[in-house]
Image (cartoon, helix red, strand yellow):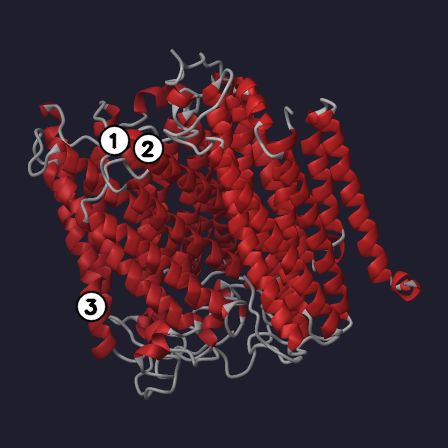
């Protein structure tokens, strides 16, 4: 056991795993208490941890870093930025659903 | 700088990538980027003529105001298949997978792409997509237009929408694979000394195109998957009856399809730069401007997609923002036009066939690009949207521009790819005929659109007939002109004079290896110590202009 | 996907060295993951907007999801990812046996995830949540609830497809580890598969709040 704990690989893995589990517990708890709105942001934080540690982005080849950042940039700025410009500034009338009288 | 001006008069055929394995298996299971380029060439040529046949039938129908040969529903299916095939099975793949696949590794001094097996897989993905779309075509096609707008495509269309959608998804995976391959290749496989800023402009164009392919296509995949789900399950997020929003489909569709038009045309910018520098014997004017313009077009190209939706019901606020961004993207394109003109200025200009195509591109692309500003402007777009003005605009860019550039590239690199020289007389004739046929076909359409003739209609008011007949006449000339290269290029494969390594006396690493190249591209890996386009300045040219013309003029062939 | 050839330290002919090939393969995998970010991103884009337009329906629909299975699955997939990460670190030391164990454990957890997901889907269908004519729900904004469930199936089905591919890749790594192929100077296939596997984890980590937690 001690030998296992002295291995830095095991320590990093276990610590990261525990942090992820804590975050899951946290967001679950928040949701049950009615603060579910924080959950997607916890999801983003967990994603950041996974990118940083098991996926080792900070020590990846430079080209890889550029590609990852490009993907994230395009997602955030493009899709969620410019892409929501129209839907959020439109003022549609609500439609009637077929299933309602 | 090599001063070799071999016309290959006495070169015997030598072992090359063409002779390395002659079985069907060696072609269908090849991982050699040069052979894969030829596999793609066969496919996209076939698709070009399928899409062209649809166009021919459309133009024939439009000779008469009441529709000469087909009914409305058939006409709808014709323009749909024309758009789907020409966009996804010709324009998007052609320049990258044929010319890019063949030339890119040679240009950067690499022995192959980064992932050769992925390259082969991309061709099979492409063909699978083509099979599905062809299957949809043979079963009667679909009538939604290549834009697949909902709820027509999800609820009301009677054609084979889902089948076509899956075919397009597969061709999209092929584009992603090719783009991924090119990006990693350019990052990682440049020869020693080939720094980023020594790469020819064509490589930068392919890089920009690949960024678009890789980041935009996945969004199309999601849009088409949800479209198919909505059509098959009869529920969906794009259906207003369910509280969904048809504009969401358009947002996802155009988020891809606007970058897609730059995917289609950016390689053309690169090809034209290569041809103009070679046939002006001058380094490109403003190298840094050209490459940063390419990158800007690729990036800003992601920011303008709502300009296809100005009259669809988007908020005026977003319309203003996207209109402004669409104006901004005209700037880098215009910069490039000045770069090409500046390159030609004071150059040693030879009007071989590739140069005719390239110069034609510059003129026609400029007209097409400038007319884009009319439709980028909100007020005028209200009148011009969905008219023939838009049709003329994009055909000037895609056909007058990109198809012309593609043919120019085919002619330019033909000696390298095949080891043969084509007939220069026929080449110039076809190029000129294409240029004139094109203008006759598409210029009247600007006028038609300005006066209000809507697009995607098989009939029209009688007062538009003269212009329509002119356009159809031009289309006939174009059809003949596009068929001509099949003949003289095909003939050259058997009877053409053999080419030396550098028949044009052009710069570029691809011209420093044999024509056709050996399987491993270079017998020795090149080490680059010179800048791109290292032509001598005019006062230090080795030959006078008349000597140069004499050495490369092959009109007698 | 990248070129998974070159056992030992030999490199494919277009590469100058094994390091060159390794760096290219990893760069290629990250680029592929960037495309996946855009792919799933498009779905999240729709989710955010439709949620905004149908807050009641999405809120009611969330109550019908199986929070227990969802949460258990989140724990399982995070664990699977971390176990494989430990395996990646062992691969860098050329220790094939730990890689084999990690791959088997991680892949096994992945299979449990898929199994639970299939069970959950059968539950959902049983509750009348399959989109279309058969859809049943209680309360107001049935239309909004219907949209939620459509997005739910789209997202989880695409995720399960990716998960399945991931399990196959992990199994492939297990097979290669069993043959003792990985060395301190040749281990990048494990890293590349690990990247893909962790990414599938990231997608679920972001689906989980949208499906089970928001509006509960």
Instruction: From the image, state whether disc 2 or disc 1 is nearer to you.
Output: 2
Tag 3 or tag 2, which sits nearer the N-term? 2
| Disc 2: host chain | B
Q: Position of residue B215 (x, y in %)?
A: 52, 46
Q: Circle 2 sits in a helix, a strand or a loop, which is it? A: helix
> Which mark, by number, is residue B488?
3
Instruction: From the image, state whether disc 3 or disc 1 is nearer to you.
Output: 1
| Disc 1: host chain | B
Q: Which residue is mark 1?
A: B388
Task: Decide which of C73, B99 is in the foreground and name it.
Answer: C73
Q: Residue at x 66, y 42 (%)?
A: C205
Q: Which residue is mark 2?
A: B154
Tag 1 or tag 2, which sits nearer the N-term? 2
How far apart in space, not on screen, are marks 2 and 3 (Cα)? 46 Å
Residue B397, by quadrant, is: top left
Task: Decide which of B224, B352 is in the foreground and name it.
Answer: B224
Q: Residue at x 19, y 50 (%)?
A: B138
Task: Decide which of A89, B552 is in the foreground and name it.
Answer: A89
| Disc 3: host chain | B
Is residue C81 depicted above or below C213 in this figure?
Answer: below
Q: Residue at x 29, y 48 (%)?
A: B86
Can see residue B501? Answer: yes
Residue C65, by quadrant, is: top right
**Label 1 Cα neighbours within 10 Å, binned few <14 / some 14-19 / many ≥20:** many
Is C77 placed left or right of B441 in the picture? Answer: right
């Amino acid at each position: 056991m001690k030998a296992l704990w002295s291995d830095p690989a095991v320590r990093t893995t276990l610590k990261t795993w525990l942090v992820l589990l804590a975050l899951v517990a946290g967001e679950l708890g928040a949701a049950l208490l009615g603060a579910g709105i924080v959950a997607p942001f916890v999801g983003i934080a967990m994603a950041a941890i996974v990118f940083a540690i098991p996926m080792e982005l900070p020590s990846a080849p430079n080209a890889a870093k550029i590609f990852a950042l490009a993907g994230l940039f395009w997602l955030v700025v493009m899709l969620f930025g410019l892409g929501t410009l129209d839907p959020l500034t439109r003022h549609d009338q609500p439609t009637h659903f077929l299933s309602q009288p | 700088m090599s001063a070799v001006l071999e016309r290959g008069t006495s070169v015997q055929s030598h072992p090359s990538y063409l002779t390395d394995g002659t079985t069907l298996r060696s072609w269908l299971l090849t991982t050699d980027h040069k052979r894969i380029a030829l596999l793609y060439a066969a496919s996209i040529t076939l698709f070009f003529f399928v899409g062209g046949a649809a166009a021919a039938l459309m133009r024939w129908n439009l000779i008469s105001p009441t529709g000469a040969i087909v009914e409305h529903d058939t006409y709808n299916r014709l323009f749909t298949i024309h758009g789907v095939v020409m966009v996804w099975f010709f324009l998007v793949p052609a320049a990258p997978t044929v010319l890019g696949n063949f030339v890119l590794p040679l240009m950067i001094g690499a022995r192959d792409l980064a992932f050769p097996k992925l390259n082969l897989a991309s061709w099979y993905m492409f063909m699978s997509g083509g099979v599905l779309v062809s299957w949809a075509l043979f079963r009667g096609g679909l009538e939604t237009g290549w834009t697949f707008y909902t709820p027509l495509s999800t609820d009301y269309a009677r054609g084979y929408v889902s089948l076509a959608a899956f075919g397009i998804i597969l061709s999209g995976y092929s584009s992603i694979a090719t783009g991924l391959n090119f990006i990693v290749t350019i990052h990682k496989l440049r020869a020693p000394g080939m720094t980023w800023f020594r790469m020819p402009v064509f490589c930068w164009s392919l890089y920009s195109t690949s960024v678009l392919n890789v980041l935009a296509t996945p969004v199309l995949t999601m849009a088409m998957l949800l479209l198919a789900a909505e059509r098959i399950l009869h529920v969906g997020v794009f259906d207003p009856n369910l509280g969904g929003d048809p504009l969401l489909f358009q947002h996802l569709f155009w988020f891809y399809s606007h970058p897609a038009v730059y995917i289609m045309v950016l390689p053309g910018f690169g090809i034209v730069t290569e041809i103009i520098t070679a046939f002006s014997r001058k380094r490109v004017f403003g190298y840094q401007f050209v490459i940063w313009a390419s990158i800007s077009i690729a990036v800003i190209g992601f920011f303008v997609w709502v300009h296809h939706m100005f009259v669809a019901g988007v908020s005026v606020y977003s319309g203003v923002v996207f209109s402004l961004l669409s104006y901004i993207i005209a700037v880098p394109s215009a910069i490039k036009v000045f770069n090409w003109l500046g390159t030609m200025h004071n150059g040693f200009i030879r009007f071989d066939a590739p140069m005719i195509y390239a110069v034609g591109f510059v003129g026609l692309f400029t007209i097409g690009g400038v007319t884009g500003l009319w439709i980028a402007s909100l007020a005028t777009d209200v009148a011009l949207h969905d008219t023939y003005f838009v049709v003329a605009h994009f055909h000037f860019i895609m056909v007058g521009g990109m198809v012309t550039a593609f043919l120019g590239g085919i002619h330019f690199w033909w000696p390298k790819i095949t080891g043969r020289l084509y007939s220069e007389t026929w080449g110039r004739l076809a190029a000129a005929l294409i240029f004139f046929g094109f203008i006759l076909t598409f210029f009247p359409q600007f006028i038609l659109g300005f006066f209000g003739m809507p697009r995607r209609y098989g009939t029209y008011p009688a007062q538009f007939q003269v212009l329509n007949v002119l356009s159809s006449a031009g289309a006939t000339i174009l059809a003949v002109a596009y068929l001509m290269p099949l003949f003289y290029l095909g003939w050259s494969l058997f009877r053409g004079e053999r080419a030396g390594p550098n028949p044009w006396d052009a710069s570029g690493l691809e011209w420093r290896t044999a024509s056709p190249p050996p399987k491993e591209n270079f017998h020795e890996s090149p080490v680059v110590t010179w800048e791109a386009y290292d032509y001598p300045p005019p006062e230090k040219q080795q030959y006078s202009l008349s000597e140069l013309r004499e050495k490369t003029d092959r009109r007698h062939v | 996907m990248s070129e998974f050839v070159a056992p030992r330290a030999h490199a494919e002919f277009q590469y100058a060295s094994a390091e060159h090939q390794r760096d290219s393969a990893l760069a290629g995998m990250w680029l592929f993951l960037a495309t996946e970010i855009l792919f799933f991103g498009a779905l999240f884009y729709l989710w955010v907007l439709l949620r905004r337009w149908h807050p009641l329906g999405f809120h009611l629909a969330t109550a019908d999801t199986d929070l227990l299975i969802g949460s258990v699955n989140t724990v399982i997939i995070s664990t699977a990812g971390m176990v494989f990460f430990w395996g990646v670190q062992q691969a860098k030391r050329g220790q094939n046996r730990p890689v084999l164990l990690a791959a088997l454990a991680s892949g096994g957890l992945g299979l449990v995830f898929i199994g639970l997901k299939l069970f959950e889907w059968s539950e959902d269908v049983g509750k009348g949540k399959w989109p279309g004519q058969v859809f049943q729900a209680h309360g107001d904004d049935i239309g909004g609830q219907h949209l939620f469930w459509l997005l739910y199936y789209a997202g989880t089905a695409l995720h399960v497809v990716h998960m399945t591919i991931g399990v196959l890749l992990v199994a492939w790594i297990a097979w290669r580890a069993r043959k003792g192929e990985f060395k301190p100077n040749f281990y990048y296939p494990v890293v590349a598969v690990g990247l893909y596997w962790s990414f599938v984890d990231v997608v679920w980590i972001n689906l989980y709040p949208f499906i089970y937690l928001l509006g509960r």
